[in-house]
Image (cartoon, grey):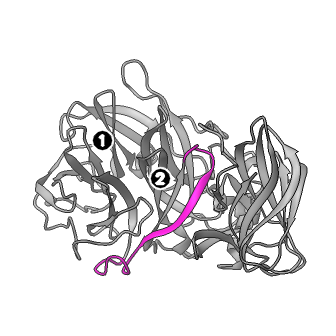
Amino acid sequence: MRNIMKKVVLLLLATVPFFSSVKADYPIVSHRYLADPGSLVYNGRVYLYCSNDDENPVEGGYKMASFVCISSSDMKNWTDHGVVFSVPQDASWAEKSWAPSVVERNGKFYLYFGNGGSSIGVAVADSPTGPFKDPLNGKLVSSETPGVMPAEHMWLFDPMTYVDDDGQAYMYFGGNGEDNVRVIKLNEDMISVDGAASRFTVPYFFEASWMHKHNGKYYFSYSTNPRNGMRIDYMVSDNPMSGFTYGGVMSPQPPENDNNNHQAVFEFDGKTYQAYHNRIVAREAGIPPTYKRNLCIDQIFYNEDGSIQEMKNTVDGVAQVQNVNPFEKVEAETTNAQSGIETKKCEKGMCITDISTGDWIKVKGVDFGKKGAKSFNAVVANVTSNSEIEIRLDDKAGESIGSLSLSDTNAEQSVKIQKTKGIHDVYFVFKGKTDGSLFDFDSWYFE
């Protein structure tokens, strides 16, 4: 357990959906504090790369020096891939890593990050889940980069890299002034710039540059300044570098936020979404919320003329796009909701840890089909005697279809269950007779 306050926050999260103040589809992961999402859609999954607010002390300060990646194939159950990049370990010159964006090109994955507000770096991996390493041993963009200066009170951060349909890559960045937006071309190697940066004026611009394309139009979205509520506005153009005109408000200041704002806009399964952060988890936990943010997601809609309807913050408003197949191995760190658990790196990847009696995880929309399932299998480790996994349907206190009593063997274990058909939310409720950690949970499947 990282600290007692974190445990209190996680326990309170179990009741978040019932608070009257909840007004968005969140938290999409509830065991971590994550912010500033950058999105990548690849091979049937959406990946979100996030500033790691777990590293920020409750008493204050943005100390983020690593990125956490989560992903989903159904928009409701999210897999925690853990830390995929950290400084100075993976980029020795950098002291901080803020607000990432990631793109794929020719089988390589390129992660762009702000070293605080002073410069921008790049890291490369062979997998969307890393590990990412710095290929330059230095900055990609700094105040010395042609075209960046002159600028007044420039924040050199929040890089967003977009690869157009013709293969040309552009990186958008900057902050703290209407004239402080910069865009620069990248070479095909994705780790060097092509020429000088250019600028365009953006009304009320503060930070969080993001570019997406829809029906041939380029949409540049961004966070407005505090005077304008730090909402997300957007501009539209037929050209990725110039000719932008103001489009209006894309989304309001998130509920339970009242502070900095950051969006990632992406298309997945034919729909457009915005990932963002707010501070509901810390607020409901009664701790200072400024430096402890959590992730949210909602859907975006266009008008017939291509303009964007102002996004509505919804309660559980994002639909599940496909059901979970329980007859294939599912990583235990894939959850829709949870209470009390944490995750860590294990022998075969990530696993759930710090499990105590009464903790639980929920997996939404599990399709057992017409034939149904008759047994449950789990891979566990570090088992404390008299520990068990109880399997319940549709509620943490719902119908019990079986319970797996765990041996101290660090291997796959199984149990016969009540035959189960159809689509259900599945709750794994953990029980034991010790006050300490019961076991580590790696993966599961049904037969």
Decide if residue 42 is on the left or right side of residue 319. left
**Magenta span:** 73-95
From the viewer's side, name the closer residue of 80 and 225. Answer: 80
Secondary structure character of the magenta stretch overall: loop
Q: Amino acid at mark 1?
A: Pro
From the viewer's side, name the closer residue of 168 and 179. Answer: 168
Q: Inspect this view and state whether residue 397 appears.
A: no
Quadrant including the N terminus: bottom right
Q: Position of residue 335 (x, y in %)?
A: 66, 55
Q: Earlier in the sequence, mark 2 or mark 1?
A: 2
Asked whether the residues under the numbered discs 2 and 1 touch, taking CB atoms below 8 Å apart as contact, a structural biologist would say no
Q: Is residue 76 magenta?
A: yes
Decide if residue 43 is on the left or right side of residue 333. left
Q: Amino acid at mark 2?
A: Tyr
**How many angstroms separate mark 2 from mark 1 (CA)?**
30 Å
Q: Which residue is mark 2?
A: 47
Q: Inspect this view and state whether residue 400 appears.
A: yes
Q: Position of residue 256 (x, y in %)?
A: 61, 51
Q: Residue at x 27, y 43 (%)?
A: 202
Checking the image for residue 203, the label placed there is: 1
Q: Position of residue 209 (x, y in %)?
A: 33, 49
Residue, far top? 304
Label 1 element class: loop
Q: Position of residue 344 (x, y in %)?
A: 60, 73
Using the image, determine if residue 248 lies above or below residue 29.
Answer: above
Q: Residues within 10 Å of mark 1 (few under 14, many from 20)?
A: some
Q: Image quarter for residue 416?
A: bottom right
